[in-house]
Image (cartoon, rainbow, N blue to C red):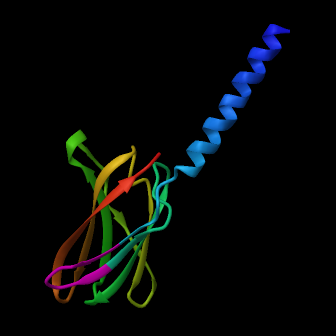
Amino acid sequence: MRRALIAAVLVAAAVVLFVMGRSAAAEPIEVTTTGTRYAATVLVPEPGTERVTVEIHLRSGDPDTVAVSSVMADMGHATPEITAKETAPGRFAAEGELFPMSGVWELSVRLDGPAGEEVLTVKALVGG
């Protein structure tokens, strides 16, 4: 009887922790940034430590290539660059594992085209 009660309490605690963890998901990231050659809005609809999609909506400039990478300087972490694909004129999307752990990341968007190359950076708070 006692074992059944302990098991029921443990199951209930696991369910509560699961629900709390799901509701504590990070908010979408949407940041507009402007450089000297390009301006863009960077959107990460579901930031997390799994595969994510990063959308880049250009406000000015016409790059031939767009790529994203991320750095967590305080922990010495960096991710390889991921090439974004053009999904519509002025809109790009990149998908991959950009945030291997929770915390504050610097997301870099490298744009290269006739106007030259430029890297725009935004901060991203990523939950687990």
Q: Position of residue 33 (x, y in %)?
A: 25, 77
For the point 47% across and 45% down, the residue is 128
Query: Quadrant location of the N terminus?
Result: top right
Q: Position of residue 101 (x, y in %)?
A: 39, 43
Q: Is residue 121 above or below residue 14?
A: below
Q: Position of residue 25 (x, y in %)?
A: 52, 52
For the point 17% across and 88% down, the residue is 115
For the point 41% across and 78% down, the residue is 92
Res. 100 image quadrant: top left
Q: Is residue 30 above or below residue 27?
A: below
Q: Is residue 67 left or right of residue 2?
A: left
Q: Magenta stretch containing residue 34, yes or no?
A: yes
Q: How many numbered discs?
A: 0
Q: Position of residue 48 (x, y in %)?
A: 46, 52
For the point 63% across and 39% down, the residue is 18
State whether the magenta stretch is mostly helix, strand or loop: strand
Res. 82 image quadrant: bottom left
Res. 57 image quadrant: bottom left
Name the outermost residue toward the top: 2
65 or 46, which is in the foreground?
Answer: 46
Q: Is residue 73 above or below residue 11?
A: below
Q: Magenta stretch containing residue 124, yes or no?
A: no
In the image, which residues are magenta? 31-40
